[in-house]
Amino acid sequence: MLGKEYVGKTSLVERYVHDRFLVGPYQNTIGAAFVAKVMSVGDRTVTLGIWDTAGSERYEAMSRIYYRGAKAAIVCYDLTDSSSFERAKFWVKELRNLEEGCKIYLCGTKSDLLEEDRRRRRVDFHDVQDYADNIKAQLFETSSKTGQSVDELFQKVAEDYVSVAAFQRTRAWTWARRQTPTSTAVVITESPLTWPGGIKGIPPERLDLAFVWAWVITRLSYPGSPWRHRWHLPVLAHGTEAAFGLADGHKEGKG
């Protein structure tokens, strides 16, 4: 979550995660706050990890820490404050420079104020839509007070993530079908999934994908072998050898 202070990032998260709207004195987010929510996308269960970053410019450098490696960013602006949209453009530029593959969602907040008085709008919908089309982002206008479009926003983030992950797994299967196991430990070296993080530096996605590749390679090489046959080849994602206690010599094509 990125955006100028006072645009309502924390309120948006509160509405989505806890389904509530907090009324009271405004409190600045210092640094960032983290929340997680488990949700369903089709037949899959997805856990969204959400960093609610500080909007104040004095925390700008700190915010970069939290969106490094992010797969999606919700960039917020206040529909009644034109300067907040200009600030949103700054964050979009930052994301494009530091996280080129991060998918961006533009979120106009406080739409309930426009229902009370349409003249309070300071950011034209069509101008933002043109900008969103130009940067290949999706646009939502939301209200944390009424809940308008809040669930739809986060649901779309999760659906897009699952869709991209499925596409990348398909690429992995296609790649794996062309490989021939020639050693006691086959190390996949062309992984399309190179996401950072994970326990002890091993991304869960890599390990999950390694099992997919293991199934493909062993099924193709040994079609008569059951899945849990004791002599299945161990297949590891590139960069995880040390974590499994393998020597440097255990590389693709070596004993």
Image (spheres, grey):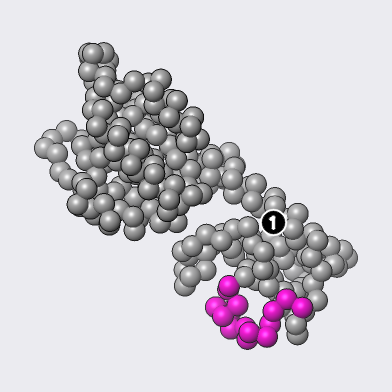
- Residue at left offset 44%, top offset 40%: 104
- Residue at left offset 22%, top offset 48%: 57
Reading the image, the residue beneath label 1 is 172
Q: Quadrant of the C terminus?
A: bottom right
153 on left or right of 45 = left
Majority secondary structure of the magenta segment?
Answer: loop
Residue 2 visible: yes
Residue 147 horizontal/vertical position (percent)? 33, 28
Q: Quadrant of the N terminus?
A: top left
Residue 35 drawn above or below residue 86:
below
Judge the density around disc 1: few (<14), some (14-19), many (≥20) Cα neighbours within 10 Å: many
Q: How many marks?
A: 1
**Residue 242 included in the magenta stretch of the image:** yes
- Residue at left offset 66%, top offset 52%: 169
Magenta-drawn segment: 239-253
Corner quadrant of residue 79: top left
What amino acid type should be assigned to the residue bearing mark 1? Ala
Residue 173 horizontal/vertical position (percent)? 73, 55
Residue 237 horizontal/vertical position (percent)? 63, 68
Residue 116 drawn above or below residue 66:
above
Residue 59 horizontal/vertical position (percent)? 23, 53
Corner quadrant of residue 4: top left
Q: Nearer the viewer, residue 255 or 41?
A: 255
